[in-house]
Image: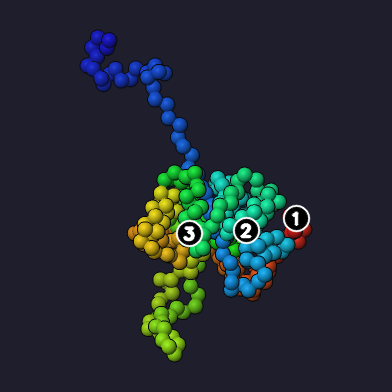
């Protein structure tokens, strides 16, 4: 019964509840997942094997990329999407280089968007978790840029790494005899997209589902999310975060890696 003089709920609500009456809540910790689509054939590289398996200073390109994300403590797990015939090979490399259960391998698709969709479907993620998607053949991404991308996703919901344009950008019309310039686009309006590209899980999952239903194929994950009407922030990138696409890129990556890594620390497996 309320004390004498109690006017009802307002004074009685301050009495402590018995444990059986109290509702106990455990706040869920936000998780960050990384997806590395690695199902590409690398036809422009014209090599004997897909470029993600080529050696960069004695270590497969894919392993360099995995190491960068494994270095970031906030990342809960890393998911590699590989072509079915190469899944065993990727799993063996993951084991050989000691990543353990933190790295998972899923089957990729014929297109990048399919590979990312397969990995998204496998994630044990909830709506407010964060998903980073990174080109498996950008092996020189650094932990600091990954951290900044995560912070930007927390603030904006979606963010990519990007570089300002240095050269003058021309818009052209393609003709049978070549390209004709139709406009000059001011450089301040241009960003050269890199990866990682990060999003809240609920946002990217919904955008991908809509794109699949409409038959839309984007050039990157950000284009799919932009199509869904969500703004995407830009985190400053670096020329060092290059994508290995042609033979000359491998030599440049070797140069950058040797500038970054002391000689005694290389080739330690």
Which residue position holds label 3? 114
Residue that lies at the very extreme toward the bottom in this rendered image:
177
Instruction: Please say if the residues under marks 2 and 1 sit with CB atoms less than 8 Å apart.
Output: no
For label 1, count other residues whose C-alpha is less than 10 Å away and answer few (under 14), some (14-19) or many (20+): few
In this rendering, position of residue 14 left or right of residue 221: left
Q: Position of residue 153 (x, y in %)?
A: 45, 52
Q: Earlier in the sequence, mark 3 or mark 2?
A: 2
Element on which disc 1 rests: loop
Q: Earlier in the sequence, mark 2 or mark 1?
A: 2
Element on which disc 2 rests: helix
In the image, which is nearer the foreground, mark 3 or mark 1? 3
CA distance separating discs 3 and 2 = 16 Å
Q: Position of residue 253 (x, y in %)?
A: 65, 68
CA distance separating discs 3 and 1 = 35 Å
Q: What is the number of the mark on residue 268?
A: 1
- Residue drawn at 42 percent across, 54 percent down: 204
CA distance separating discs 2 and 1 = 24 Å
Element on which disc 3 rests: helix
């Amino acid at each position: 019964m309320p004390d004498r003089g109690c006017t009802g709920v307002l004074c009685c609500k301050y009495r402590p509840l018995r444990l059986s009456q109290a509702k106990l809540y455990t706040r869920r910790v936000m998780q960050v997942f990384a997806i590395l689509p690695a199902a590409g054939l690398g036809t422009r590289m014209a090599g004997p094997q897909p470029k993600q398996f080529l050696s960069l200073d004695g270590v497969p390109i894919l392993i360099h990329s995995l190491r960068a994300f494994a270095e970031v403590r906030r990342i809960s797990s890393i998911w590699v999407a590989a072509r079915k015939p190469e899944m065993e090979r990727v799993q063996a490399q993951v084991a050989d280089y000691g990543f353990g259960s933190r790295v998972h391998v899923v089957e990729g698709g014929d297109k990048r968007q399919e590979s990312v969709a397969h990995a998204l479907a496998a994630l044990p993620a909830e709506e407010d978790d964060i998903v980073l998607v990174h080109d498996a053949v950008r092996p020189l991404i650094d932990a600091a840029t990954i951290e900044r991308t995560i912070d930007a996703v927390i603030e904006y919901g979606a963010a990519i790494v990007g570089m300002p344009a240095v050269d003058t950008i021309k818009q052209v019309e393609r003709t049978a005899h070549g390209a004709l310039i139709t406009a000059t686009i001011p450089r301040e309006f241009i960003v050269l997209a890199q990866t990682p590209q990060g999003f809240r899980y609920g946002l990217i999952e919904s955008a991908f589902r809509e794109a699949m239903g409409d038959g839309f194929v984007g050039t990157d994950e950000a284009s799919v999310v932009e199509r869904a009407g969500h703004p995407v922030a830009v985190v400053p990138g670096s020329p060092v975060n290059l994508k290995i696409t042609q033979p000359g890129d491998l030599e440049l990556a070797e140069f950058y890696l040797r500038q970054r890594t002391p000689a005694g620390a290389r080739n330690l497996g």
